[in-house]
Amino acid sequence: MKQRIAAACAAALLLGLVVAPAQAEGLGAEGNYVRANGNWGAELGAGYSLGFAGFSLTPGAGLYFRDGDTALYGRIEATYQVPASLRIGLGLRLSGDDPRPYATVAMPLLPKVAIKGNVGPKYVGAGLTIGY
């Protein structure tokens, strides 16, 4: 099961990295500094946002770098864009043995660029999103 999740995460990340420069609509990338599974590290990921009437569902995947090691992670977020304000929602991060639910909030800095924060049990992070 872990191998299937890892393969799916890797495929989603590669697809996002290859397609994102050519077509930015709905595709995005993010970089975060996080504490996950008891360790501080950096996340670099990509995803695709599907939206309708202010709501969006964003599956994604990426790499988690910590202490010289690398791990794959997957995530899915459901958010709502408060008009002319914040994007708020809930997410689920899949990495290691335990899925981690979290709350997320993002504040736009520029069109298609936002500062983002995630907080949940044994998971906290802050970073930037580009593209969605």
Image (cartoon, rainbow, N blue to C red):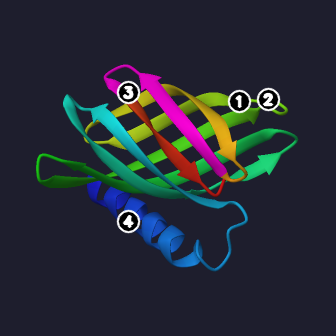
Q: Nearer the viewer, mark 2 or mark 4?
A: 2
Question: Residue 108: where, in percent of width, then height?
Answer: 67, 40
Residue 32 shown in magenta:
no
Amino acid carrying mark 2 in the image: Val
Q: Amino acid at mark 1?
A: Leu
> Going 59% across and 76% down the picture, which residue do you hit?
21
Between the residue at mark 4 and the residue at mark 1, the CA separation in whole angstroms equals 30 Å
Q: CA distance from mark 1 to mark 2?
A: 5 Å
Where disc 3 sits, the SS reads strand
Note whether residue 1 is visible. no
Horizontally, residue 91 falls left or right of residue 86, namely left
Chief secondary structure of the magenta portion: strand
Q: Which element carries disc 4, helix, strand or loop?
A: helix
For marks 4 and 1 on the same chain, the one whose residue lies earlier in the sequence: 4
Give the percent coordinates (x, y) of residue 30.
Answer: 49, 52
Q: Look at discs 1 and 3 and give the one toward the viewer.
A: 1
* Residue underneath mark 2: 82
Q: Amino acid at mark 3?
A: Val
Magenta stretch bounds: 113-124
Front-lying residue, 110 or 32: 110
Q: Is residue 68 visible?
A: yes
Q: Which residue is mark 3?
A: 124
